[in-house]
Amino acid sequence: MKLKKSAYSYVMMIGHLCADLGTGALPAILPFLMVQKGITYTQAAGLTFALSGIGSAIQPICGNMADKTSRPWLMAVGIFMAGCGVSSLGFLDSYAAMFVAVMITGIGSALFHPDGGRMANYVSGEKKGRGISLFSVGGNMGGAVGPMLAVFGITMMGGLRGLAILAIPAVLMALFLMTQQSRLGEFAAEGTKATKAAIAAGQKDDWKSFRKLTGVVFLRSTINTGMNTFIPMIWLHILMQSEAKSGSVTTILALSGAIATLIGGNLADRVGFNKTIRTGLVLVIPSLICLTLSRNVMLSTFLLIPCAMFLNFAFSPSVALGQKFVPNHLGLASGITMGLAASFGGVVSPVLGKIADTVGLMAVMWILIALAVVACIASFFVPDAPATHFETAAIDETGEAGEGATVA
């Protein structure tokens, strides 16, 4: 099946959705594991670390490999591993085995993101903010659909073994991508050729600005991971809701985040990447404070929406801005701003879990608020998006250039 180039933005979005099903499902599964398997807060956070720990190490490696030699088949392998790891949790009783299974999902996610983000850039045309936001929305939707599938499988298909349902879309998408290898290879070759031409024309990477952005992205990711991991536990232990209801709040977070990611990407193309990032990080602070202070279930549920939306306004603009800072290393930029950043949030989770066990869940929420304040301040030290070589040429010819335009 040969599709139009523009259609592959949606293919990559769906691929991202399938790659992140297991990642999104884990926070919803944790309350069930705590009740039915007796794991502690620290062990629950340890599974979040398993999801991210190995990925932290290999994301930059995979991104660097993607920039040197395109391997579109790695996206299919990554999706397959990501779906099959977490889906096996229902068949395991040992915590060590659970840890390994979740780690397999983390490795699969690490394999997918660098090539996936790079390919999303290549097929998106001039509107990089919109193209990257579509790709990012796929990940958000994975975070929304994953919990729904997990809760459905557990409650309607005979307990934790119902998690096997998570493997189905991942396997199907992996098989589809394998049928598209030649077409994806063409896009990768075109993008590589354009990048080489731009490098020859004088296009350079701004690693200093990229490092500043990475700091903000890592803080945002830690907040996001902390919310996804510990807010369901607040519903379970503070608001005294059932495991199913507690697990389902991650769906609200993910759906709200998906909408905000799409809005943020389109907004970034119009008003600028930095303005969009800063606006989201400023507004998420009062939203998190209100959520932390609330003890009413309905009000708390409503407050999940602005918390997730404002935090995710900054997501896709950050990824696109990272690619603009280092346009000669798109795979590495994607691996760091999407994959490694998410992994970093998981690495911090065991520390937050230990704090929750010893001090209490609400202490974790105040830490997340403090991190949001730091991220907001740090975002004002990130410079504006640079003009690439092609944009500079456009300015010379027309006198103006849109911020969303870039190479490829």
Image (cartoon, rainbow, N blue to C red):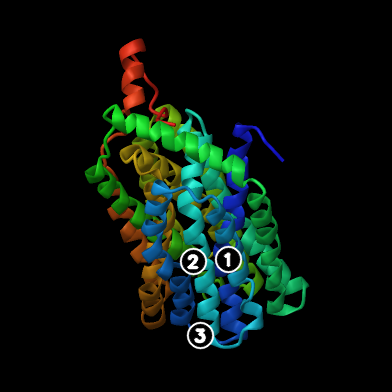
From the top left corner, tell me how far across and down residue 341 is, in percent. Answer: 39, 57
Give the crowd class for mark 3: few <14, some 14-19, many >=20 residues within 10 Å.
few
Q: Of the numbered discs in the image, which one, if any, rests on residue 107?
A: 2
Q: Label 3: which residue?
A: 96
Amino acid found under the numbered disc labelled 2: Ile
From the top left corner, tell me how far across and down residue 241 is, in percent. Answer: 61, 72
Q: Is residue 167 above or below residue 31?
A: above
Q: Label 1: which residue?
A: 81
Task: Name the residue located 69 percent from the left edge and 37 percent from the top edge.
Answer: 2
Q: CA distance from mark 2 to mark 3?
A: 17 Å
Task: Name the residue located 59 percent from the left edge and 68 percent from the top edge.
Answer: 28
Q: Quadrant of the N terminus?
A: top right
Residues tagged 2 and 1 counted as in contact (Cβ below 8 A): yes
Amino acid found under the numbered disc labelled 1: Met
Task: Name the residue located 48 percent from the left edge and 34 percent from the top edge.
Answer: 190
Q: Is residue 126 above or below residue 76?
A: above
Query: In the rendered structure, which disc, 1 or 3, sits on the residue that comes first in sequence?
Result: 1
Q: Which SS class for mark 3?
A: helix
From the top left corner, tell me how far across and down residue 47 is, in percent. Answer: 48, 75
From the top left corner, tell me how far across and down residue 273 is, in percent. Answer: 38, 36
Quadrant position of residue 12 = top right
- Asked whether residue 298 appears in the rendered view, the answer is no
Query: In the rendered structure, which disc, 2 or 3, sits on the residue that comes first in sequence?
Result: 3
Q: CA distance from mark 1 to mark 3?
A: 18 Å
Residues tagged 2 and 3 counted as in contact (Cβ below 8 A): no
Q: Is residue 392 above or below residue 225?
A: above
Q: Which SS class for mark 2?
A: helix
Quadrant position of residue 94 = bottom right
